[in-house]
Image (tube, grey):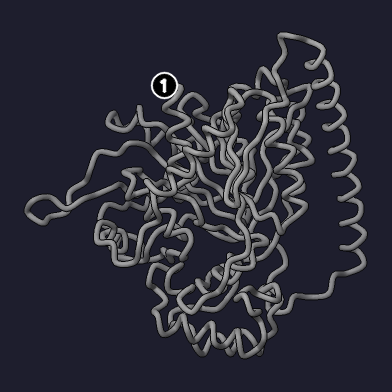
Amino acid sequence: METASVSRAASRAHTFGSAPARERHRRVAPGRGGVSGVGGAATSAVAAVAALIAMACIAAASLRVDTYVASVRASASASASAVDASASMASSSTATAVGADGDATAALSSFEEDLAVEPELTIGDTSVAYVAKGWNAERRLIGESKIEAIWEGPAATNANGELTATKPRGVLLALHGCKHSAKDFFANNTKCTECRGLAQEMAITRTALSRRFVVIAISSFGTCWSRDVDGPRVNEVLETFFSDDALKDLPLYAFGASSGGSFVSELPFITHAAQIAGLIIQIAPGPRLSEMTPASDLARYPPTVFSHMPRDERTAEFVKASIEDLQFAGVKVLESKLNPRAITPQYFYRESFGKINSTESEALRGSLKSFNLIDKDDLLTEDPRTFDTIHVDMLATHAPAWDTMLPDTSDVRELLNVAHATHELSAQDFAANLAWLIRAHNAHT
């Protein structure tokens, strides 16, 4: 998966809720897209100049937002009835959580409990074996514009050993990054012959189904998500889904990465706001305080997890600003940091849930080691997006025959990007993050 800028979302994060502002800012930031290909290509002078201009515009927009926020906070400090923006924070190597009441310690201890109570699924867990077959899945093209939507409901084995659908506890909307589609979240089977089920996307689907969630994935109209274009499309899909009386009252949670994360951050301003129970915004910023989005409006935002990769310092800065503004407005927020991962002999086997077998996993690591692409701590020494043809071809000799080894369609390439932890969809800590959102939502219902 290729790195793409989330800066456009940050530069216009103060425009929520304003029709004229929405007209000025058409596109949701591109996410898992950008320049692709082994080794990349030299940046042209024109592109460099354009990038500098864009950065200057972003800096100016960010300054305007920060200036407004500073004035709001100064006023709040002078008022005894204003929101207290100085809540203390607790942190761990994995997550920092702050509740609306500022009780960071309680929020963090509960998150740690979630890690124990809601552990990641282990390879060979028969309770989710049906997911690979798409037993309870459906792919539909909705409306006149044929919006691609795929959903799958939870199931379990009854006393007779037969699979039966189980009553869902909620709905998870899963949105892909640039150059991807809904098909990445579901296994290739007779229900969806075009699905490709990438490793990390499938891990999210599998985990949500095991927690009795219906998983809905929607494909964007273009390469990346656009609020103006895709907002009505997502609304149409959700209206179709929730028209079922058995599903209409289920709480809606949403996960999105990069471009999909930017879109998820806008979802409460687009559709089904009253039904949205929580958001996981991954490798993308969220909303900001502004004249058009004051704290009183932002206070209605749902509990939110920001799952991001600190190695991407620019995005981390935007995420930090969003977290501060949401906390100021009294929103429950969890920061979940995704740091570089060690590529152990069984890394690819474990993270692919066994799709890449144990022998292949060891061989892939051995190939990386032979090229000095991992250090003594098993961490990557180079960004895998910059691997040259020789490196990729050598890895391909040890990868499963079904893996394309192409960006955006390869499990091996995706898992390399996850290990490098710069910009990639990741299922790390998804189970605990979802459990935290459920608890945060239930505390208010």
In the picture shown, does residue 57 fall above or below 397? above
Q: Quadrant of residue 9?
A: top right
* SS type, badge 1: loop
Left/right placement of residue 339 relative to residue 354 reads right
Q: Looking at numbered disc 1 in the image, what kind of residue is underneath it?
A: Thr
Residue 88 location, x and y as percent?
A: 67, 31
Placement of the N terminus among the 4 image quadrants = bottom right
> Which residue corresponds to the image point at 69% horizontal and 70% vertical from the top-left?
36
- Residue 234 in sight in this render: yes
Q: Residues within 10 Å of mark 1 (few under 14, many from 20)?
A: few
Taking depth in this image into account, of 144 and 295 the one nearest to the observer is: 295
Q: Residue furthest left?
A: 160
Q: Quadrant of residue 324?
A: top right
Residue 149 location, x and y as percent?
A: 43, 49
Question: Residue at label 1?
Answer: 445
> Which residue corresponds to the image point at 59% horizontal and 88% vertical from the top-left?
393
Residue 429 location, x and y as percent?
A: 49, 52
Left/right placement of residue 209 relative to residue 52 reads left
Taking depth in this image into account, of 418 and 34 the one nearest to the observer is: 418
Residue 134 location, x and y as percent?
A: 30, 58
- Residue 282 in sight in this render: no
